[in-house]
Image (tube, rainbow, N blue to C red):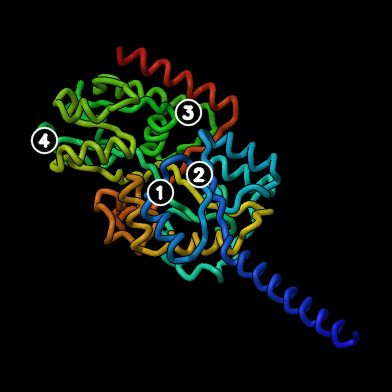
Amino acid sequence: MKKKIIAMLLCAAMVGTMLTGCGEKKEEDNRELVLYTWEGLFPQEVLDQFEEEKGIKIISSNFDSNETMLEKVQQSDGKDYDLVIGDDYIIEQVVNNGLAQKLDKSKLSNYGNINPLYQSQFYDPENEYTIPHGAGIPLIVYDPEQVDFEIKGYSDLWNPELEDKIATIASYRAIEGMVLLTMGKSMNEEDPAVIKEAGEKLKELAQNIRMIQDTNTQNALLNGEAAVGILYTSQVIAALAENPDLKVVYPEEGLGFGIMNFYIPKNAPDTEEAYEFLDYILEPEVAAECFNFLGYYCTNKAADELVNPDLVVPDSVTKGEIIQNVSQEAEEVYNQNWTEFKAACD
């Protein structure tokens, strides 16, 4: 009888060991990463390769606005997502609300590949929480066959030779910020008197404006209706794809740009998987594949030689500024400036 009991105990122990082993194996096989991003942000090949190399299944979830993303992360207290992407201004709220965890950079062997131009911004001055992943930069593009002088910066747009020759996007803060940069001021100027002064200078530009249009602005440049365009990143790339002879200007006064960033939510359930994905995305070859697909400016210095050259900001550009929220008083003056400028363009 005692032998039977011992045998039964041994058998139970073996079964328990087998079940425990199976449980560990199952857990290892079920490694997951929940990505919360804009739709269509990564080439499918990049995601597939990560899953194959790391054995980590990616579960993608998408949002339609930065505000939706913030709301969802707040509602779940950061527990539903492992890695999230958001734009600069909303990241400030994420960090201020304690929804992001500080990065352990020792887990990111490729961290040094990041271009410093896109770091140390207002939302993360010490680079404690974020990894930049693509920048949007409105730029000047012109047709050298229609412009008889070299455009080097925003100030050149007031040249009388450009009368009725400029097509511009309709982002009032970007355009007014451009004017402020020519005055040696911040794109986020708060002094109403200075903003008003910029508005007067902006009205002087009206005689050179052919059109103000936010969608497909590059078409006016391509069909010859305009000689100069102030264009969004996607429009710059589209214009160059059709006419590589166009000239792109990185204004000597400095750049205005927007930056997307990764962050890990404070209560992310799979942080190790999040770090593995971040380090993978920071590999030069992978980063290049992402930026060529995305059409945003490359924020990975090590990938600069691998991406479409049109997506690389020259080394000579060392300063840039992101448009931020301003006081209500300042905002009212910016809006008034824009109203008067559009009226002057009619």
Give the quadrant of residue 5. Answer: bottom right
Q: Which label lies toward us, 2 or 4?
A: 2
Q: Are marks 4 and 3 in contact (CB under 8 Å)?
A: no
Q: Amino acid at mark 2?
A: Thr
Is any part of residue 88 visible from this angle? no
Q: Which element is circle 2 on?
A: strand
- Which residue is drawn at the image coordinates 31% and 46% (left, top)? 252
User: Residue 288, position in %: x, y?
Assistant: 33, 57
- Which residue is drawn at the image coordinates 58% and 39% (left, top)? 69
User: Residue 19, position in %: x, y?
Assistant: 70, 70
Label located before the other in sequence (2 or 4): 2
Q: Are marks 3 and 1 in contact (CB under 8 Å)?
A: no
Residue count near mark 4 (Cα–Cα under 10 Å), binned few <14, some 14–19, many ≥20: few
Label located before the other in sequence (4 or 3): 4
Q: Any mark on residue 148, and which?
A: 4
The residue indicated by pointer 3 is 195
Q: Which element is circle 4 on?
A: loop
Q: Are marks 2 and 1 in contact (CB under 8 Å)?
A: yes
Q: Which label lies toward us, 3 or 2?
A: 2
Q: Which element is circle 3 on?
A: helix
Label located before the other in sequence (1 or 4): 1
- Which residue is drawn at the image coordinates 48% and 71% (left, top)? 109
Label located before the other in sequence (3 or 1): 1
- Mark pair 4, 3: CA separation: 32 Å
- Which residue is drawn at the image coordinates 57% and 45% (left, top)? 91
Q: Name the residue nearer the viewer: 297 or 199.
A: 297
The residue indicated by pointer 1 is 42
- Mark pair 1, 4: CA separation: 41 Å
Q: Name the residue nearer the viewer: 2 or 99.
A: 2
Q: Amino acid at mark 3?
A: Ile
The residue indicated by pointer 2 is 37
Q: Amino acid at mark 1?
A: Phe
